[in-house]
Amino acid sequence: MPTVYGVALSPFVRKVRVALAEKRVAYDLDPVVPVNVSPEYRKISPLGKVPAFRDGDKTLADSSVILAYLERIHPNPPLYPSDPYDYARALWFEEYADGGLVTIIGPKIFFPKVVAPRFFNQKTDEAMVQKAFEEELPPMLDYLESELAPGAATLVGRQFTVGDIGVASQFVNLFLAGFGVDARRWPKLAAYLSAVHERPSFRSSIAEERAMLGV
Ligand SMILES: N[C@@H](CCC(=O)N[C@@H](CS)C(=O)NCC(=O)O)C(=O)O
């Protein structure tokens, strides 16, 4: 059975777990916390980050790399469109999440609201969190709202892709931190996120993470 390394609350670990669930692949989870990682772990993940992945004697790091590998090993259901432009758009939304949304939701909202007080006994910088939520995040949500078709449950055509996994995974962290997406201001995005988070693949991760945090 393959092993996923990394704590469940990481949006990048969640991406891998959701992809495995979509593809109905069983795996073990080794909940590595990416702080002062061991030299052994660094051999699997040279940047010291989570997730990493082991499949027999093969190891990989980085959620996007792992998802690309999984697609080749377990092609069904496909999480990458076959049309070249749709394929690139799915990668773009994955990048929008992994390189864009995370820079606000991770260090400016989820970390100070959830990780700092619970795991590091640190006070939340509420002013930073409010500024991130009220000023920095909205333009990023405006863009997603503009990209969604009315009633769409997927970002690229009608196929559920790595783009949806990346984007919806970041919003799990926003919601776990106690924030939401205002359906009056971003109606398509709010409905889209509800639909994606209702998928069994996301539902089981979210339930497990809520139980971990007691929220
Ligand atoms: N591009 C990487 C990002 C992974 C990442 O930043 N993971 C965070 C946890 S959410 C981490 O390990 N941070 C520890 C560090 O940067 O040292 C991926 O997609 O896997």
Image: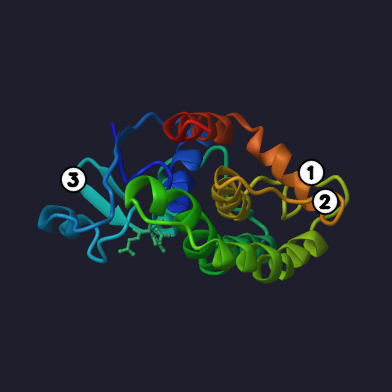
What type is the residue that disc 3 sits on?
Asp
User: SS class of the residue under badge 2?
Assistant: helix
| Residue 191 image label | 1
**Is the residue marked by circle 2 packed among few (<14), some (14-19), or many (20+) residues within 10 Å?**
many
In 3D space, how far apart are the residues under numbered discs 2 and 1 (Cα atoms)? Answer: 5 Å
User: SS class of the residue under badge 3?
Assistant: loop
Q: Nearer the viewer, mark 3 or mark 1?
A: 1
Q: Is residue 205 above or below residue 152?
A: above
Of residues 101 and 121, the one drawn nearer to the viewer in this rendering: 121
Left or right for 183, reference 168: right
| Residue on which disc 2 sits | 188
Residue 18 x, y percent position in the rendering: 50, 40
What type is the residue that disc 1 sits on?
Ala
What type is the residue that disc 2 sits on?
Lys
Reading the chain from its start, which is encountered first: label 2 or label 3?
3
Are the residues at dot 2 and dot 1 in contact (C-beta closer than 8 Å)?
A: yes
x 12%, y 53%: residue: 40
Left or right for 168, reference 116: right
Residue 85 x, y percent position in the rendering: 69, 66
**Is the residue marked by circle 1 packed among few (<14), some (14-19), or many (20+) residues within 10 Å?**
some
